[in-house]
Image (spheres, rainbow, N blue to C red):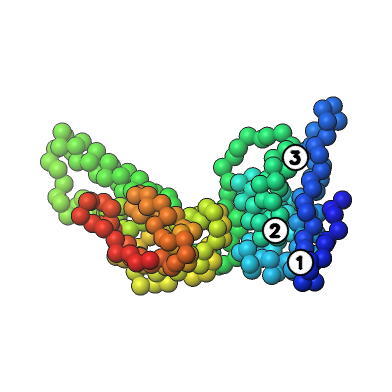
C-alpha cells in the first residue's frame, strides 16, 4: 500500500514516495500476470498533485489512453516493451517518482521475452496521404521489364526467321519511371520524445501536427521538401539514404529544405536553419 501524502510547509501535498512490492521468493511462482504496484503509485502521485489525466497528457505529450493503460498496468495495450519503458520513464519523472526505480520494478515483473520489432503507436492526426505507397514503383518497373523482354524476344525470333517488322508495328513502351535520383526522400523518426512538425512537399502541405514519441514517417518530393520541427533535437532524419542523426538543437526550432541532389554527391548540401 502506498504511503499517505505528506503536507509541505506551504500547504501543498507532496506525492507519496514509491515503495514497490518485493518480488516473490523462489518457489512462489512467476510474476507474469501479477500487479507490480507501479500503476497504483502513478495514480496516487497524480491524484495527490491534483492533476487530471488530460492535463498530464498535455504536459507529457503522451496520449491519455496510454496513461490510463500505465495506471491500470495494462502494458500489453502499448504493443511493445520499448514504448512501455519510454512512457513509464517520462510519466514517473513528471509525477516526481524515481524513474530508475520504477523501471527496475517493471523489469522484474516477469521473465524476459524475445525482443520483437515494435510497431509505431497509432497517430491522432489524419493519415498522411502525401507519401507514395511503397511497392508501387517496383510493380511498375517489373511490368515494364516484362513488356521489354517480350518485345526483344519477338524481335530476335523474327530476325532469325525473316525480316524484322517495321518500327511503327512494334509496341511503344511508356515513359520510364522516375529514377531515385530525381526524387528527394526524407525519413523522420521521434525515438525519445514528441515534436511539432510541418512538412511541405513541392509546395503542398503534407503534414502539420504532433509526431508522438516512437513515430516513424517517410515523405517524398520531386523538387524540394521543406520541414520544420520543434524542438529540433527530438527528431532523427535520414535524407536520400544519408543518416543525419538529430541535426536540430534540443531547445530550438529546426527548419530545413532538401532536394533530390542533397547528399548524393559531396557538392550537394541542403539549406537548413535551426
Say the numbered circle drawn on residue 49. 1
**In the rendering, at what x and y percent does residue 227 appear?**
40, 66
Q: Residue 262's quadrant in the figure?
A: bottom left
- Tell me whether the residue at label 2 lies in contact with that at label 1, contact meaning CB atoms closer than 8 angstroms: yes
- Which numbered mark, 2 or 3, is in the foreground of this view? 2
Distance of mark 3 from mark 1, alpha carbons?
A: 27 Å
Say the numbered circle drawn on residue 164. none
Q: In terms of secondary structure, where does tag 3 sit?
A: loop
* 195 displayed left or right of 5: left
**In the rendering, at what x and y percent does residue 94 appear?**
66, 60
Q: In terms of secondary structure, where does tag 2 sit?
A: loop
| For residue 28, above or below residue 242 | above
Quickly name the residue at label 3.
109
Quickly name the residue at label 2.
96
User: Which residue: 35% across, 54% down?
Assistant: 239
User: Which residue: 33% across, 64% down?
Assistant: 272
Q: In terms of secondary structure, where does tag 1 sit?
A: loop
Distance of mark 2 from mark 1, alpha carbons?
A: 10 Å
Amino acid at each position: 500500500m502506498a504511503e499517505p501524502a505528506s503536507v509541505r510547509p506551504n500547504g501543498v501535498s507532496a506525492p507519496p514516495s514509491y515503495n514497490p512490492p518485493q518480488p516473490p521468493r523462489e518457489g512462489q511462482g512467476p510474476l507474469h500476470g501479477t500487479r507490480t504496484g507501479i500503476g497504483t503509485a502513478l495514480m496516487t502521485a497524480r491524484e495527490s498533485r491534483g492533476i487530471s489525466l488530460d492535463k498530464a497528457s498535455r504536459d507529457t505529450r503522451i496520449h491519455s489512453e496510454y496513461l490510463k493503460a500505465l495506471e491500470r498496468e495494462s502494458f500489453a495495450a502499448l504493443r511493445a516493451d520499448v514504448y512501455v519503458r519510454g512512457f513509464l520513464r517520462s510519466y514517473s519523472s513528471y509525477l516526481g517518482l524515481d524513474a530508475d526505480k520504477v523501471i527496475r520494478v517493471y523489469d522484474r515483473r516477469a521473465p524476459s521475452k524475445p525482443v520483437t520489432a515494435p510497431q509505431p503507436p497509432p497517430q491522432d492526426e489524419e493519415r498522411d496521404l502525401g507519401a507514395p505507397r511503397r511497392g508501387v514503383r517496383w510493380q511498375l518497373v517489373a511490368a515494364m521489364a516484362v513488356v521489354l523482354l517480350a518485345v526483344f524476344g519477338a524481335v530476335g525470333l523474327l530476325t532469325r526467321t525473316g525480316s524484322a517488322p517495321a518500327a511503327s508495328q512494334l509496341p511503344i513502351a511508356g515513359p520510364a519511371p522516375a529514377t531515385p535520383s530525381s526524387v528527394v526522400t526524407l525519413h523522420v523518426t521521434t525515438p525519445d520524445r514528441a515534436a511539432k512538425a510541418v512538412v511541405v512537399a513541392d509546395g503542398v502541405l503534407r503534414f502539420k501536427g504532433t509526431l508522438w514519441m516512437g513515430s516513424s514517417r517517410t515523405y517524398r518530393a520531386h523538387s524540394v521538401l521543406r520541414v520544420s520541427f520543434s524542438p529540433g533535437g527530438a527528431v532523427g532524419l535520414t535524407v536520400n539514404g544519408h543518416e543525419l542523426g538529430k541535426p536540430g538543437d534540443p531547445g530550438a526550432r529546426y527548419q530545413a529544405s532538401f532536394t533530390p541532389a542533397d547528399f548524393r554527391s559531396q557538392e550537394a548540401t541542403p539549406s537548413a536553419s535551426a
